[in-house]
Image (tube, rainbow, N blue to C red):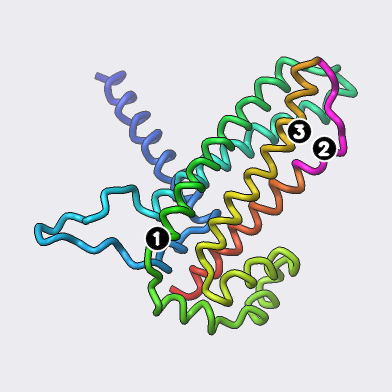
Amino acid sequence: MRMKSLSIINLLIVCMVFAFSVKLNALMFGNESDKAYLPPPPTTNGISSIRCITLGQLISDGGSSFFKSAGHINQFFSLVESSEVTGTDYIGLQKNLNAAISYLEKSRTIYLQLKNQAAVTPYNQEVISRLINFDYGLFQQEYSLFPVIFAKVKGFLSVGDVTGIYNEFYSCTGCILDLLYLLKKDIDAGIFPEISTVWSVNQKYSEIKLFGQYVARVFYSIK
């Protein structure tokens, strides 16, 4: 009986962690931006006339895969960092790099669907109006946001181009993948990775993380 109770408790904990993880990914990467679009029109029987996954779900799924990729690339960086002391663990580097690539490829596929679906979905003009009239300068100053990255966010949202944000997600993940493929070529050949490429990968992951987070912060502020 005690073992059964423990199993139930463990199951509940796993469910809670999973739910929190999904919510966290949404909080960190472009959440609420789907509110800039009108929901699919219902048919007479109350069922949506467009049978597809929602924009909100795509945002969450894309962000989840992105952060899983980032987790593995951080492990890759850790192995690179420790290689001077412990020696180069090519198996560990290869394992984490392959996982990072796999999750990022999945994320980019989702962002392709997201941007294509958004492109044929009408905007919610009330939300677009809030974006256009938002005080971006004051917001950036109040929260000490990095000016260069926030300026990029402002460039899209201040003109109501939310679909452009999704295009950026797709483009940026593609740029990172190109760098990861370069790293993979070296690692698979047993060659220590070019450190300048490692630095570029780290920077690109950091930039898109902040870009997605700043998008989320703006949309939370106009709710």
**Disc 1 vs disc 3: which is toward the camera?**
1
- Please report contact status of discs 1 and 3: CB closer than 8 Å, yes or no: no
Q: Which residues are magenta?
A: 190-201
Q: Name the residue located 71 percent from the left edge and 70 percent from the top edge.
A: 144
Percent of width and height locating residue 201: 75, 41
Mark 1: which secondary structure? loop
Q: Quadrant of the N terminus?
A: top left
Cα–Cα span, label 2 and label 3: 11 Å
Question: Which is nearer the N-term, disc 1 or disc 2?
Answer: 1
Cα–Cα span, label 1 and label 2: 37 Å
Percent of width and height locating residue 105: 57, 35
Question: Which is nearer the N-term, disc 1 or disc 3?
Answer: 3
Q: Which residue is mark 2?
A: 197
Report the disc number at residue 120.
Answer: 1
Mark 2: which secondary structure? helix
Q: Which residue is mark 3?
A: 77
**Disc 1 vs disc 2: which is toward the camera?**
1
Q: Residues within 10 Å of mark 1 (few under 14, many from 20)?
A: few
Question: Which is nearer the N-term, disc 2 or disc 3?
Answer: 3
Q: Is residue 95 left or right of residue 186?
A: left
**Disc 2 vs disc 3: which is toward the camera?**
2
Q: Name the residue located 74 percent from the left edge and 17 percent from the top edge.
A: 188
Cα–Cα span, label 1 and label 3: 39 Å
Identity of the amino acid at label 2?
Answer: Thr
Q: How many marks?
A: 3
